[in-house]
Amino acid sequence: MRKLVFIGMLWITAIAAKAQRPGYALLADVSSFQTQFAAASQKTNTIKSDFVQEKNLSLLAEKIVSKGKFWFKRENAVRMEYTQPFQYLMIINGSNVYIRDSQKENKISTKSNKLFQQINTIMIDCVNGKALQSNDFKVRLFEGKTTFIAELSPVNKNLKTLFSNINMIIEKKDYAVSRIEMHEPSGDNTSIHFVNRQFNIPLADALFAIR
Amino acid sequence: MRCLLYVSCWLVCAACSSSYKKLQRTEADALCVEVFKPLFTRALYNTQVNVTGKHLSGLLLIKTMPDSSIRMVFSSEAGFKFFDFEFYKNEFKVHYIFSQMDKKPVIRTLRKDFELVLMQHLNTPASYTLRSNEHYYNVFQDGKDFYYYITDSGCTNLVRMERGSRRKRVVEATMHAGSDGMPDTIGIKHYNFNFDIGLKRLQDDTEK
């Protein structure tokens, strides 16, 4: 019995440790944050940025780093161009996706694939901030010295097999998303860090055109 | 009508023809191919997969772990993981596979394809060598599967690898070694259905 109590205490300690984030505290005033975040998102019509993507494979103690350029245009157009160490272009425009790798180009309508549609929506919603209002996730907010973390835990069974949670790191100074982390149930994760961000500069529709 | 019959007969004969029938048994040591066994310390490959008219691309990381098992993780360029396989001696483990790929024939095919390239069946007791006019076929039998490593007569150059039955070729693979002993390119082509895999090594930041 004593052993069971000990195991129980260990389990509770583990859960408590997981719930905490070093340097961050659970945000008390959620409504104030959401108002300011929504206002900042409303004002963002375009984003142009460089990005560094890091795929961490925990059990292999390995990471795969790739770099490229990122463009976003309101309401739901994203262009990601990977330039290192490979060439790869992905354009999401509404429900259509265009992919060009080193060998072929491909156009996909996400309407035909529910899972692809969900992933597509997550990508766009994380950039434009709508993910915080999504019914697909339970959201917890944490406040640090210079950033907020919005921790999105999937409620949907399909998404749970893909992600344990998705974190949006939001800058306190301008309420802009500077990093997205996608954590997998296996312990692996992929983070996309946006650098050299420029907001509301004119971006031609041609950048997001899928012909 | 008669012409159609001849064509049909010819097609049937062609389909049944043996890939290895004309080869002669020879006394050469099949295990000479051990020197071509690739040692994947850590290599990242740009990967192109074409299967029955559909195309998929991504990144394949191959790494030898401290316990000498080999891990293969295939993910999309955007980081979405498709599978994570482990090869250890004659054992195979699926650590993860994306639900839409989680089908026994898919896993079995991928396992056998990569085992051919990793040369995982060289320790089988059933090995022998066949020869054609040009090449030596170093054969390793594992159950119903025959793994063929085709070299020049002096076993100084690995021309290609094949898997099949005693009679018929099913898969062909080629590999071009890089300067550090790990292959720069790997190609896998199936002959029984439309399926090929192309790997081209990437030099990424984490290797520097």
Image: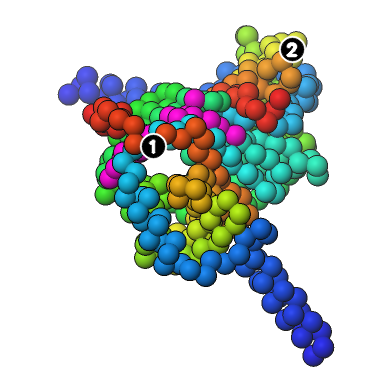
> Is residue B128 depicted above or below A184 in this figure?
above
Closest to the observer, A157 or B55 = A157
**In which quadrant will I find the N terminus of chain A?**
bottom right
Q: Which residues are magenta?
A: A65-83
Residue at the image position 46 percent from the left and 67 percent from the top: A30
Is residue A196 visible in this depiction of the protein?
yes
Closest to the observer, A205 or A190 = A205
Q: Chain of mark 1?
A: A
> Is residue A115 depicted above or below B144 in this figure?
below
Predominant secondary structure, magenta span: strand
Dividing the picture into quadrants, the one containing residue B15 is: top left
Q: CA distance from mark 1 to mark 2?
A: 60 Å
Residue at the image position 59 percent from the left and 41 percent from the top: A55
- Tell me the tag on residue B99: none
Residue at the image position 73 percent from the left and 21 percent from the top: B181
Q: Is residue B102 magenta?
A: no
Residue at the image position 53 percent from the left and 66 percent from the top: A27
**In which quadrant will I find the C terminus of chain A?**
top left
User: Which residue in the structure is indicated by mark 2?
Assistant: B156
Front label number (1 vs 2): 1
| Residue B90 x %, y % | 72, 44
Q: Say if labels 1 and 2 share a chain.
A: no
| Residue B8 x %, y % | 29, 26
Q: Is residue A75 magenta?
A: yes
Dividing the picture into quadrants, the one containing residue B26 is: top right
> Is residue A4 depicted above or below B14 in this figure?
below
| Residue B94 x %, y % | 61, 51
Q: How is the image coloured?
A: rainbow
Amino acid at circle 2: Thr
User: Which residue in the structure is indicated by mark 1?
Assistant: A199
